[in-house]
Amino acid sequence: MKLGENPKLALIKMIQGGLMFVFGVLILMVADRVLQPSISQEIIALLGLIIAGVGLIWTLIGYLSMSVLRIYYMIKKKD
């Protein structure tokens, strides 16, 4: 709810999440193209998937804070 009060913080969270997602996808691409097929390649790819997933959720939280929670905060503030 605090993110709805501060749109700058929500935008920063959204950008951070997007960068984390891109970093996770980059790890996936490196694991696929550079490393030889092995268990370590799979572990690195799993790490990339986890980072990309967390980044996606972080971006979604920032986006929803900028839109839905901001509208909710404005409606609640008028009361």
Image (cartoon, rainbow, N blue to C red):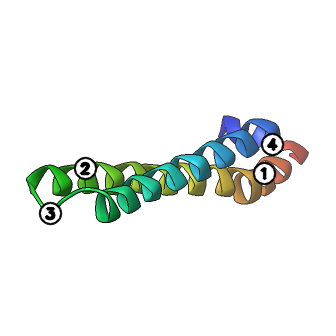
Residue in the foreground of this view, choosing between 55 and 61: 55
Residue, x 39% and y 52% (percent of image)? 27
Q: Nearer the viewer, mark 3 or mark 4?
A: 3
Spot occupied by residue 64 in the image (x, y as percentages of width and height): 66, 57
Circle 1 residue: 70
**Kind of residue sitting beneath label 1:** Arg
State the quadrant of the N terminus.
Answer: top right
Identify which residue, 23 or 54, lies in the foreground. 23
CB within 8 Å, label 4 to label 1: yes
Q: Are marks 3 and 2 in contact (CB under 8 Å)?
A: no
Q: Is residue 16 left or right of residue 47?
A: right
Residue plotted at (83% across, 53% down): 75
User: In the image, residue 23 lies at what x, y percent?
Assistant: 49, 49
Helix, strand or loop at mark 2: helix
Give how far apart the Cα atoms at labels 2 and 4 are: 35 Å
Distance (Cα) linking label 1 and label 3: 47 Å
> Is 72 placed left or right of 32 in the picture?
right
Q: Nearer the viewer, mark 2 or mark 4?
A: 2
Mark 3 element type:
loop
Q: Earlier in the sequence, mark 3 or mark 4?
A: 4
